[in-house]
Image (cartoon, rainbow, N blue to C red):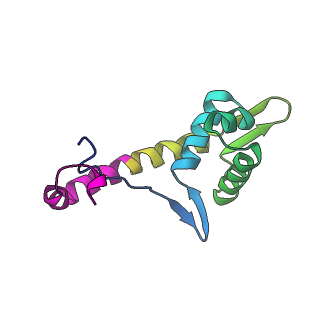
Amino acid sequence: MADVGRIELRLRIRLGDAIAMGPGKADLLDAIDATGSISAAARQLGMSYRRAWLLVEEMNSCFAAPLVEARPGAGAQLSVSARAVLAAYRASDAAAQAAATRAAGSIIAALRSGSSDDQ
């Protein structure tokens, strides 16, 4: 019953066909920041190193300044730009969630109670 009326959005920022920033990439940036390593971040998120590296490359190619700076032999770190982008993305996501929840009030009120198993 706790899930009745929950709004779930997945905010994605696109540059052409590429997803410059989305929830998975934001989580990857957080994990790189916490671990200091792309490979450790990938393990923490349950993805392959190759997948994490491809996501980092895509982000770095989408933004004017690289978001992740590899330090050969010393891991990786977020750039100053990454911290600003990540903070703006998280704030935008929270604002979008709040706006969608307010806007969908009449839809939520019209839902029947119970689980999605009732369908």
- Left or right: where does residue 50 sit relative to residue 22? right
Extreme residue in the bottom direction: 16
Residue 96 picture location, percent across and down? 34, 54
Q: Is residue 43 above or below residue 9?
A: above
Residue 64 picture location, percent across and down? 65, 56
Residue located at (47% from left, 49% from top): 89
Extreme residue in the front direction: 118
Which part of the image, by quadrant, shows the N terminus? top left
- State yes or no: residue 112 in magenta: yes
Residue placed most toward the observer, 98 or 46: 46
- State yes or no: residue 8 in magenta: no
Residue extent of the magenta highlight? 94-119
- Left or right: where does residue 112 sit relative to residue 22? left
From the image, give the main secondary structure of the stretch colored magenta. helix
Residue 102 occupies quadrant: bottom left
Residue 36 picture location, percent across and down? 69, 30
